[in-house]
Structure formats: structure tokens, C-alpha cells
Image (cartoon, rainbow, N blue to C red):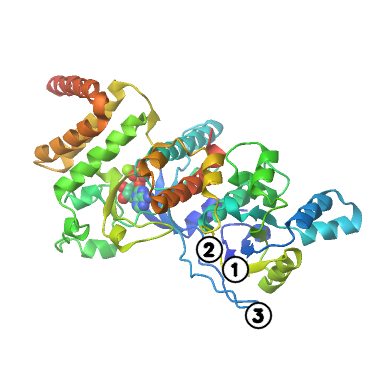
Amino acid sequence: MESYLYDEFPDNVCTVHIALFVDVANAAPLRARLVRASTLEGVEGDAEREAVNFAFIDAKLVTSRLHVQTALYQSIIAFTQSALKTKTVHSEVLWSLNPTNNITEALRRFGISDSSTAIVVARVGPQSDRSVIEEQMREVIQGRLVPLDLHNLTDWSAIKKYYKLNTDPVIVAQGQNLNRQRTTIDELVTSFVAMKSVMS
Amino acid sequence: MPSTSLTLLASATLVKQGAEAKVYKSTLHPAPNLASLAPDKVQTDASQPVYVLLKHRFQKNYRHPTLNASLTRSRVAGEARALMKCLRAGVNVPGIRMVDAAEGTLGIEWIEGESVRVVLGGGEDGEEIQDDEQGADADIEPPDLLAVFNVNQNDVMVMIGTEIAKMHLADIIHGDLTTSNMMLRRKRSLLSTTSAENKETELLLIDFGLSYISALVEDKAVDLYVLERAFASTHPDSEPLFALVMQTYAEKSGKDWKAVGRKLDEVRLRGRKRSMVG
Ligand SMILES: Nc1ncnc2c1ncn2[C@@H]1O[C@H](COP(=O)(O)OP(=O)(O)O)[C@@H](O)[C@H]1O
Ligand SMILES: [Mg+2]
């Protein structure tokens, strides 16, 4: 798990923790748990929401550390300006990653699905004990925590489809050079996430 | 509570104080805390902090505050959209790293390199901040930057012509083409680096603050004319060099060149007449 401390953000959202889990065995029950937590009432509901208080992202749709960091950063800016398009700073991360304004689509595409096997999990919050956060992540995700090497897990054709890159001159020009194409795609989607708030 | 962007700017290094914007170098995502927590000792590749150029359009107090804020917002949005359009069109420009339109801040990939103006011996930009350290070095012979980038002047002209042609083919008008608004850097790639790639130098266009979208031949011709004038004033005896920029532009623009070239002749003529009168 990597932890980032941002001096420029207010205390309640100054820290970002990011981890990558692979060989995830409980995507379907985890997804069901997220759905249930959102509607559960009372003390039990609060506890459940706290337990899953993360952004869960399908790692197939993340191209690099910077890509997901950029989504987190823009989501925190929106949070501090009371300009969230979604309910929480964590769901905002999924919205920030998706190139359209459709919230349901963003959650469906970039959130986890029943078949997800690799998950990027992130927590935005105050400065806190890193071991506690990591333990919470391990409690909800059954999988192997590994270094944040994302590009090997990326589904590049899904990325190209969702971000509508297939006909971009820069991609067409690169033809068969996969390494160069992936570097370019990573740059395009990272830049796109950064400027989504002023996209149109 | 001070805003996000302003706190970020307070710890950044001022690069340039322009008329419309202040430009800073800053880290964006700090180096991570990776201290291993769990018994299985997860190792992570040591990631470097990410440097960005922060361009902050400060509020001009003579304008109406609300109008001011929406103007600032649309300028930031305009510059970000132009960069994005260039990226998609394959024009070499820096990537976008953060946008805080409410505060007028745009974060752009930091280019570790040098402006073409300086590389061609045109000196630093007039508005460049000179701190004491730089001032003391002022008389020392500058290093041969062309050699540092392993290019000659002709290579640079070809790169300029190529990038502008790609930009115009995408109907993007830069609006302020000068050699200060172009930078050279040694190529590197985000995901993988082969040693061969590392030897290459690339030219990037920057400063899209005055850019706009237009398919008009006239706008493209004026864009080129602005660069021609800038070359003449900052780089003496540069006509043959500039001719190579135009030759490359013509080659790369294909069928579009004929109309733009003809229009450029017209624009030059207008320019000369104006300077004879004025
Ligand atoms: N992405 C960048 N990386 C490094 N230096 C940059 C970058 N963008 C601009 N600069 C430097 O900052 C100067 C001012 O930036 P620019 O965008 O041209 O603003 P201005 O509108 O004030 O001219 C440039 O001339 C260049 O020297
Ligand atoms: Mg400039």
C-alpha cells in the first residue's frame, strides 16, 4: 500500500492510500456487500459503510499510478469545493475516471464487477495509522496485495473503446508499436482525467 | 480556509511572472510513504515525485469579480482543451496533470528541457525571473545546448515545421508562436524505456493560452506570420533557418499548403504595407 500526504488539502482529506490486490476471490460478494451497505440503516449501516469506505476500481481500466492518482486528486478538489457530482469522494473517483457524465455508467464500468480479479482500492481521509487502513483493506478484499504495477493488468482495448481513442490520429499513426501506443494511451487518459471538469 | 490551489502555489517555485499568469514549478503527487507494513513485505518500485508546471491566472482587480472568475475559468478551460486536442492529434505537447478552474490553476507535465529560444542563442525570455545565482553566472559562456540535445539547427527547424503542420491539420491555431513557446527535451517514456529511445530529442509546443480552433486558411497563415516575425526579431540572420521551417511545414501539410502559402504571402504584404505607413 502506498500513502500520499497532500499539504494543500484540508485535514479531513489530506491523505490518499492506494493498493493493488490481485487474485481476488470475493469480487461478487464484495460487490453485493457494497450495494447492501448503501441502503442499510441504523448503527449497523454506519459500521458497514465505514468498513467499505473505499474507492474500489477494476484494475483492468487503470493504466498507471498517475492515472488513478489524477482521478483521486481531481475528486478531492471537487470535494473541497463542494462540487462533487456523486455522493462521496470515493464514488467521485469512478466518475472522474469515466469520460462521460453518466454516473451509473461510470460505476458500472470502472467499479468492480462480479468477475473482477484485480482491484485497485483507495482511501481518501485524514492522516491516520497506515497499518489500520491496510488491515481494513485486507479484511474486505480476499486477494494478494502486490506493488502498484498496473500496466500489465490493463485491458488496453477496453480503455481505447471507453475513451474513444481508436480513431485518434496519434493512435492510428503508431500502428503496431504496442509499447509506444500504451505509453501514449496512458498519457491521453491521464490528461483526460485531469481536464474532465472543463471537458465541455 | 485557504484554497487548495493557493496553498499549493505558496510552496512552489516561481518560474515566470507574466502579464496574465504566474508560472511555477511544483511537485504534485509527493513521494509516497512506502514503509512496509505487513509481514509479507510488499515491495514497491520507488516512485519519484511528479513535477508539474502550475500556471495560475491571477485575478485582475480592475475587472468585475464575477466576470473575472468566469473569464479565468474559460481561459483555463480553453488552454486545457487545446492541449487535449493536440494530444489526441499527435502534436507533441506536455500532458495535463490537474485543473482547478475555480481557482484558475492549470497543472501541466513538467518538461525537463530548454526553450528553443535559448537553444538557438536568443537568450532568456525578457520576463524571465533572474535570481542572484543566475545573475552571477550571466557572463559565463553558455554550454552548447544543441550538442547537449544532440541536434543541429536544421534538425530543430524540421521539428518546428512538423509540429506546427500537425497542429494546423487538426485546426488548432496556437495564437502565440514564438521560440519561447517551444521546448526541447530528451525523450523518455512512461511505461517502458529502451536505450535507443532515450537518445532521441523531441520538440514540444507549449503555452496554448491564446489558442483557438479554426479551419480558416487566414488564421493558419497569420499563425505562421507571427512566428516568422518572432524569428526575425529574436534570432538575427535566421531567414535560411526559417525557410526550412516553412519547407517542412509545406511538406507535412500536403494539399492544405497551397492555400495557406498563398495566404501567407498576402499577410506578409499587408504587414509590410502597415510598417511602411506606421
Ligand atoms: N510544461 C513546462 N515545463 C517546463 N517549463 C515550462 C513548461 N511550460 C512553460 N514552461 C516555461 O515557463 C515559461 C512560461 O510559460 P508559458 O506557458 O509560455 O506562459 P506565458 O503565457 O507566461 O508565456 C515558458 O516560456 C517556459 O520557459
Ligand atoms: Mg509563453
Q: Chain letter for mark 1, please.
A: A
Within the image, what quadrant is residue B229 found in?
Answer: top left
Name the residue carrying label 1: A146
Amino acid type indicated by mark 3: Pro
Looking at mark 1, is its residue's CB closer than 8 Å to ligand 1?
no
Mark 2 element type? loop
Look at 17% across and 60% down and name the residue there. Answer: B142
Badge 2: chain ID: A
The reply to whether label 3 and label 2 mark residues of one chain is: no
- Indicate the secondary structure of the residue bearing disc 3: loop
Tell me the kind of residue under disc 1. Val
Residue B198 x %, y %: 30, 60
Spatial distance from mark 2 to mark 1, Cα to Cα? 8 Å
Q: Nearer the viewer, residue B263 or A105?
A: A105
Would you name the residue on which mark 3 appears?
Answer: B39
Q: In this orientation, which residue lies closer to the viewer: B106 or B104? A: B106
Which residue is at the front of the view, B137 or A54? A54
Residue indicated by mark 2: A149
Q: Is residue B16 visible?
A: no
Indicate which disc residue B110 carries.
none
Q: Kindly check if marks 2 and 1 are in contact, taking CB atoms under 8 A apart as contact.
A: yes
Q: Residues within 10 Å of mark 3 (few under 14, many from 20)?
A: few
* Residue B146 location (% of width, % of height): 18, 55
